[in-house]
Amino acid sequence: MAATASGLIANARRAVVKIGSSLLIDAHTGGPDTARFEAIAGALVRWRARGIETVLVSSGAVALGRQRLKLPAGKLALDQKQAAAAAGQTALMMAWNTALEPHGMPAAQALLTFDDMESRRRWLNARATLDALLAAGALPVINENDTVATAELRYGDNDRLAARVAQMCDAGLLVLLSDVDGLYSADPSRVPGAQLMAHVAAITPEIEALGGEAGKAGTGTGGMASKIAAARIAARAGIATIIAAGAADDPLDRLTRGAPHTVFAPETSRTNARRNWISGAIAPRGILHLDDGAARAVRSGKSLLPAGIARVEGEFSRGETVALAGGDGAVLAKGISAYGAEELRRIAGLRSADIEAVLGYRRGVAAIHVNDLVLEDQG
């Protein structure tokens, strides 16, 4: 049976919700649509009460900054857009803080760039920050850092950024709020009788061809084509995507009550996607030689602790993939190291409780967490 939005939301433990400029900006005033901010904030608070941790990817800074700086209508030059982003980001966060304050949930700004998402070390740092914010009960509000991004190295729309954020923070669900109900069999504004596609099992060239132009002129930059591209990124990472209308007063609550939408199914499970990436996509940068006890623990599905590392071979940074070898030198697993080579050399053979005393900090008790390990016979 095909998954529905209400079912996916009910089973989600962590989700990323993206909402675009056209849904947040008052078309008459150019300022924040206060009712929309309040509706989204209230729904996210209710999701949190149900056990769903949520990261919000919010557009709107450029549109708000354009108004504050009294910039002309139409397409902005890159420097003008960056100036608008700088001026508008404070207004955007003020709107979210105002909407969340009555619920006691703090909003936390996180501005990311293409480089942040493609650099493994920055990726890990950003993920750790989001994890800490969610653990503290805050709502991370993410936007692309247009102030420093270049035309060549940027996502250009928050749909694809949201998909990468969902992958980064290990979300099980991506929700893209749009100005239409979902993906239609044809452009409903031009083709009478076009049908809403409630479920997309695979993103084929035919599905991609259904992507339309960008959203409302002067506000949004991402149309259906960018949402399909985002759904593809999510699907390959084992994440389901929902596209639904966000113009209603309570778009997220409406989804739980069966409002029209399109679900894009994941291509694989998140576990398999991660294992495939670790085992095949990245060549190991070093080798951790384990003692017999650690080798047995890893084979039995446990994390690798520093105490079990006998020797560190090679030079690598935190977040890079390394091989794990037993006493006979044979590789038994691959994994993503939580520490760099020099750090591991300093804490190899020590108890996890001693890490902070030696390094001055501790990123975790494990050198490689079990979720970041793939046994060779499972690759």
Image (cartoon, rainbow, N blue to C red):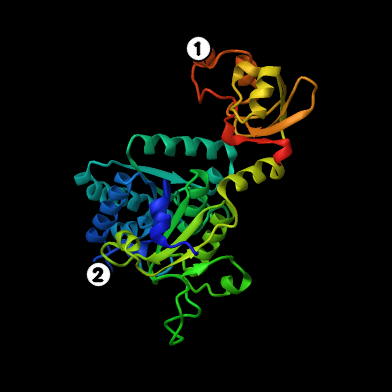
Q: Nearer the viewer, residue 47 or 106?
A: 47
Q: Is residue 81 visible?
A: no
Q: Residues within 10 Å of mark 1 (few under 14, many from 20)?
A: few
Residue 350 appears at what percent x and percent y? 59, 13
| Residue closer to the observer: 189 or 244 | 244
At a point 25% along the width and 64% down the height, the residue shown is 249
Number of the front mark, 2 or 1: 1
State the image coordinates of residue 40 (x, y, percent, origin top left).
29, 56
Please name the residue that numbered disc 1 is placed on. 357
Q: Quadrant of the C terminus?
A: top right
Say above or below: 305 vs 38: above
Which residue appears farthest toward the front when viewing the image? 1
Which of the 4 quarters of the picture holds residue 315?
Answer: top right
Residue found at the very far bottom of the displayed protein = 192
Q: Please, what is the three-letter code of the amino acid marked with disc 1?
A: Ala
- Residue that label 2 marks: 28
Mark closest to the chain's N terminus, 2 or 1: 2
The answer to whether one can see residue 120 in this image is: yes
- Whole-percent x, y for residue 22 in the image: 35, 65
Q: Amino acid at mark 2?
A: His
